Amino acid sequence: MSAGATQDADLQRLIAELLVVRASGHLADHQRRYPRWELTNSELQALLEAGVGGVILLGGSSAELALRTGQLQHWADGRPLLLCADVEEGVGQRFEGASWLVPPLALGRLHRHSPEGALRLAERYGHCTGREARAVGLNWVLAPVCDVNNNPANPVINVRAWGEDPATAGALAAAFTRGLQAEGVLGCAKHFPGHGDTDSDSHLELPVLPHSRSRLEAVELPPFRDAIAAGVAAVMTAHLGLPALDPDRPATLSPAVLSGLLRQELGFAGLVVTDALVMEAIAGRYGAGEAAVLALEAGADLVLMPADARAAINAIAEAVAEGRLERGRLEASVARRRAALAGLPRLGRTAADAGQAAGADGGLARKLVSATLEIRGRILPPEAGGSGVNLIRLDQALQAPFLPAAAPAITVAAAAGFRPCLLAGDTISPWSDDPQAPLALERLGEGPVLVQLFVRGNPFRGHAGGSEPWPAALGQLLKAGRLAGLVVYGSPYLWDELRELLPPGLPAGHSPGQMPLAQEEVLAGLGLGAGARYRSKAIAAAAAGFTD
Amino acid sequence: MSAGATQDADLQRLIAELLVVRASGHLADHQRRYPRWELTNSELQALLEAGVGGVILLGGSSAELALRTGQLQHWADGRPLLLCADVEEGVGQRFEGASWLVPPLALGRLHRHSPEGALRLAERYGHCTGREARAVGLNWVLAPVCDVNNNPANPVINVRAWGEDPATAGALAAAFTRGLQAEGVLGCAKHFPGHGDTDSDSHLELPVLPHSRSRLEAVELPPFRDAIAAGVAAVMTAHLGLPALDPDRPATLSPAVLSGLLRQELGFAGLVVTDALVMEAIAGRYGAGEAAVLALEAGADLVLMPADARAAINAIAEAVAEGRLERGRLEASVARRRAALAGLPRLGRTAADAGQAAGADGGLARKLVSATLEIRGRILPPEAGGSGVNLIRLDQALQAPFLPAAAPAITVAAAAGFRPCLLAGDTISPWSDDPQAPLALERLGEGPVLVQLFVRGNPFRGHAGGSEPWPAALGQLLKAGRLAGLVVYGSPYLWDELRELLPPGLPAGHSPGQMPLAQEEVLAGLGLGAGARYRSKAIAAAAAGFTD
């Protein structure tokens, strides 16, 4: 082998170390939920053997993930990997079995009335996430979201933010970061320089922030400064246009934003990682290889989810050969990556320990729900012998991990006599053409109607449920004397709006969380559940599904 | 401690060994899907320490189950446990990640045209199930179903049976048993003396079979004779009234059926296990303790899912003290249990091996789908720029493990231009009051309609989808010129009925399987999918859910 070829192979490994590729948290290829985005095991194993330095994981239970992270580490032949996931709302948000916590904005709201309490809970939130992440083999948590959600119509950040004003968001994100990193995992403040004031979704198109530098200084930047002051290990860039800072390139690819603003002005010395380069706003516009080159040129250390890992490695190697990128620049990023990993305690649990350790902090999950819910009145079950409708609004019936068949929102309501009726983007329409009476009531059946709305900002939706005529629909049910109660799970904005429209005596509740624990607590607060659950034999049998 | 107390403690442990209790396959208590039926870990650990001899598991992925079975074995302090599950259609039917196979009746149908091929596949089916069961730590598979499904309206057996006539059911069940047990796990022929000719569900009420002894000899018993001749390790009793054999007691509790017919006449020397005693037909009538006593009195060795394990142990101990049950009778059952376990190779895989080993036989799953599907014609996607409706019929939208959001029935059809519209017991009704035009078409939206029906007999439903007006609905769509195609997943009876009503050129298909693999193969056969999947950017993005 010639010296040139050896050098080339070394360079390829050097570059590979800066990539973070996407994989399923499941063990087997056929379990992948998104085969288009998730590498097969043979591709993954080959990339890890070629020196790829990180993997972002999604899908599978926490027990499976513990096995999976061990498998990846094994394929990497002992080289320590960065193993990360978007666990912004507890490890249980993405990996079943661990703690699933209310969204950060719940604490942002609590902070208005009880700043000290909210700060303490944010730090516990970080500890819980960090401890469980380590238990399942993750060493890098892609949180906190440091965006200030000052735009209620934001379809992608919304309740993922820690606050609606810079001071709250910064204080809570910093508290979270301290708790998280004290557990021996890395954090990641995102999405720099601030994705809170957009009303479009960068998963689908490139949002543009028209703000001046002074406005950024006043609103967007403070939480990042706070997280950096708290020692956050990494910062993730946003796929945003910021013409005031860089008229040509989105933040992710902008030297002015990454090197100028983040490194020099804010003095951040940790890891800079791009948001997923496969996202349409970047991949569609620059191509798989060139996007990765531009990101490193701009000042990023790590390239997350390149649309094509091999193409990215080759394009970066070519950019070094052409003199566009200096090898020393890449070496500095590798050194920064290794230093971050070197500071962590070694992951060494067995998979079985992990499965049991994860989810052990159930107390915090319940405490967070209790501290942030709102309740008024008690729901009256349908008259004896009668039944009512449990009208449940979701984005997609087939994509609702918070709503297993035995979820309290279903079973508790059923035990009280409300039969479930799902309304979602993938079910039959409930809407008539009459704006004054938008619900086609004849499609729902008879009886009082308990309305449970699961609405929050979610990536890829392009909206936060705001286009549906719920104010008019509730008015219609009230007028017909059929509204038994209202629960909003998720969006505080929708809750604020609808609450005002209800007569004072009408039973209603809200939790910022959508998970089963939130359903249980809200419904119990409204007088349903606990002993009442499974009151009916038929429901108990239907819910059981035991041996046949 | 007095001799009497010691003896009593010994007796309690002896009895405990004959119990098989129910647990979730998940590791943590809060992950249990059916807390009413599934013991908590502390209850479970206490019962195993008290000597309980078996656990039936449901829920969780195969990787989790591998961890879980190790945990249970650990709690039992080295005493070998019977660890079982209702994996009648491959381990993947109950535990995600392993092979999910077409229902047995698919091979029963294939057997009409290709008896040798069907027998070979049934034996591989057994091998695959046995190998994967061992890999996840199960040593007892509660299959084959030996019931003859000669009643198409049977709501609970249906496609779970291996045949619609005694000879087919017997030959295939025996072939399955040979393959299964060759892998070092125990099988279980069920539900003795035959649950095929009922049109009610013993999960909900006690069905009565009015047949004479000679009729039983001709139809119900032969498959059990065949499975016994093949060496099946266990037989499970049915919760059925059989007045011709026992005018007083259901089969599960009948000395005439268990001791007379099964042991003496059929000469079965293996393990006799009850069906779940918690089922309403038994527990509701006899009580938790008395039902267990009656089952052992009748001749059962093992008591499955007593409604209350402690109550069952105490009631049995009391029955011994009172002389109703002989201690020697229980000792003989314990000896039979230990002999069955002693014949098995030791389970010794690590959890990580198990996760990877399970699901390794994907080839068989696909082969079974291909060998048993039926296809005619090619579906035309909606005109360019237009879109159509993908009308998907399910029992319950929230209880459809075969239909994850990225299932081919959704994504392949979406890529071809058909937007999903779910119709289920828990969604908004699609039905009008007009029997000639039963679909309220205005609720579905515009465009051609691809109809995909997921219908099969399922426990706890009380029907097999037969009450919905699909013949008239298809006629209505045909008349409107809007029927793009029909697929039936599951019931061969519904397919037989609907196929006859369609004009010859209309694209239509059927698989006895409902799992994603079956969807993929049927839709590919009808000209959709493969390269076409994820053709649309919006769908790809929506399906992706990657890092945000």
Image: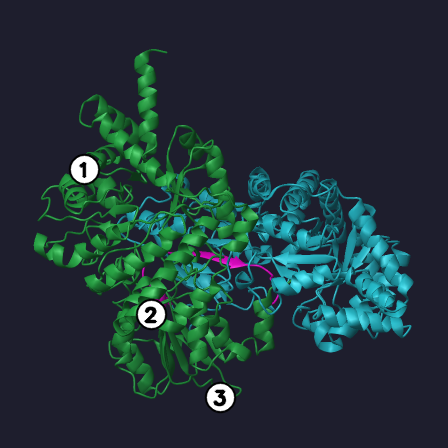
Chain colours: A cyan, B green
Q: Which chain carries label 1?
A: B
Q: Give the range drawn in magenta.
A: A441-460
Check the image and report above or below for A48 versus B32.
below
Image position of B5 with respect to A232: above or below: above
Nearer-N-terminus badge (3/2): 2
Image location of residue B196, percent across then percent down = 21, 58
Work out whether mark 3 precedes mark 1 in sequence or the reverse, and give the earlier one: 1
Q: Same chain for marks 2 and 1? A: yes
Amino acid beneath label 3? Glu
Q: Which-is-in-front pick, marks 3 and 1?
A: 1
- Secondary-structure class at tag 3: loop
Q: What element carries label 1?
A: helix
Which one is in front, B117 or B516?
B117
Discs 3/2, front? 2
Is A447 inside the magenta-drawn segment?
Answer: yes
Q: Give the residue type that dot 1 points to.
A: Ala
* Residue at the disc numbered 1: B298
Q: Which of marks 2 and 1 is in front?
A: 2
Write down the chain letter for disc 3.
Answer: B
Return the mark for residue A538: none
**Three-letter amino acid code at disc 2?**
Gly
Determine which of the numbered discs, if any, sits on residue B383 in the image.
3
| Residue position for label 2 | B117
Q: How crowded is mark 1: few (under 14 residues within 10 Å), some or many (20 or more)?
A: many
* Quarter where residue B291 is shown: top left
A205 sits to left or right of A337: left
Could you tell me which residue is drawn at 34 percent across and 32 percent down?
A: B17
Determine contact: label 2, label 1, CB under 8 Å: no
Does the stretch in magenta take in B293? no
